[in-house]
Image (tube, rainbow, N blue to C red):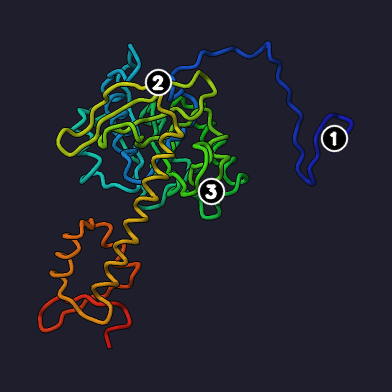
Amino acid sequence: MVNENGIHEEGETVVELITKTASDIVTQEIIWTWYPFLPQGSATLLIGDGGSGKSFATCALAAAISTGRPLPGMETAMPPSDVIIQNTENGWSTVIKPRLDMLGADCSRIHFIDDSQKRLTLTDSRIEAAIRKHNAKLLVLDPWQSMLDQNFSMNRSESVRPALMHLEKVAQRTQSTILLVGHIGKSRGKAQHRSLGSVDLVNAVPSALCLGRAAELDPDVRCICHLKGNFSSLGPAILFRLNKDSGFSWIGTDEDITPDDIMNFNAAKSKEDKGKLNEAVDFIYDVLSGTYMPAAEFNEMAAEMDIADKTLERARKKAGVKSRKIDGIWTVFLEGEDD
């Protein structure tokens, strides 16, 4: 209700009406941490399948920004700037720091928030405080799903929007880029619908990226595709190589690869993995039904069937394989057959 003085009344709360005029606004040019993918003063979403190289890619971004090296597609770079990486899935001493060293980062410019006393959440005031303390130009939240408030539902827009609006305002006030790294959902469909959580997450950010493999690429090549860009035309796919021998390297661009190519590859790979898992489960039932077998012999037979260790482990859980020592030898058997 609005009273005769133009004041909006909401129960006992009185909010004064304030208007602003467009002619009083000073226009500002958009500044880019990485054109056209990472605008400053905004949040950006990066989604990808587990194990696709998302965290390695964010370390590569941090290394370039910390040393003032140009990112792919940029002729000039920003001055060396500080970065905050908040990663809840990988250890700093065992994974993140070794990667940063390998990538030639200036580690004196890369920081993280110590949340050992209190878990960090998306709306935590320490996020803005840390950005201001280090004048950081990039803040990585990886994965964002691990930093949800207790009452936050990532599948409901009424939960997503306020959290995203809060981070957008933090980015605007600090003129930084906030990169939300997330997992891809298992459902099929267009790329913009595949972020784990509400589709409103993609709608709520001005720029969104997806990362993964595509069928036409070598097995060790990944691509970053521009899924959404409100401030520019969509950029080309950025390619990088990731393998055990040579590590990480940017290798160029591709104008033809699209976000849906990544999603289609993931869907096909998931179907293939499911087929391999079912084959491994059938193998287990064939060799273990009604009998016990030394674990070493069981593993050797699985290897001869070209069943990968990870697939075998998943199949063991699905089939209910148990193990125990019999006469000093580790033995495997099916659950319910240990009487």
**Is residue 56 left or right of 225 when viewed as pictured?**
left
Mark 3 lies on residue: 154
Quarter that holds the C terminus = bottom left
| Residue lying at the far left of the rendered structure | 328
- Label 3 vs 1, first from the N-terminus: 1
- For label 1, the crowd category at 10 Å Cα-Cα, with few meaning under 14, some 14 to 19 and many 20 or more, is few
Cα separation, mark 3 vs mark 2, equals: 32 Å
Q: Position of residue 262 (x, y in %)?
A: 40, 36
Instruction: Name which residue lies at 17% across and 60% down.
Output: 303
Mark 1 lies on residue: 2
Label 1 sits on a secondary structure element that is: loop
Q: Residue 333 versus residue 9: which sits nearer the camera?
A: 333
Q: Residue 5 versus residue 228: which sits nearer the camera?
A: 228
Quarter that holds the N terminus = top right
Q: Amino acid at mark 3?
A: Met
Mark 2 lies on residue: 255
**Is residue 300 left or right of 334 when viewed as pictured?**
left
Q: Amino acid at mark 1?
A: Val
Give the numbered dot on residue 203. none
| Residue lying at the far bottom of the rendered structure | 339
Question: Residue 65 falls in which quadrant of the image?
Answer: top left
Whether residues under marks 3 and 2 lie with C-beta atoms below 8 angstroms apart, the answer is: no
Q: Position of residue 260 (x, y in %)?
A: 46, 34
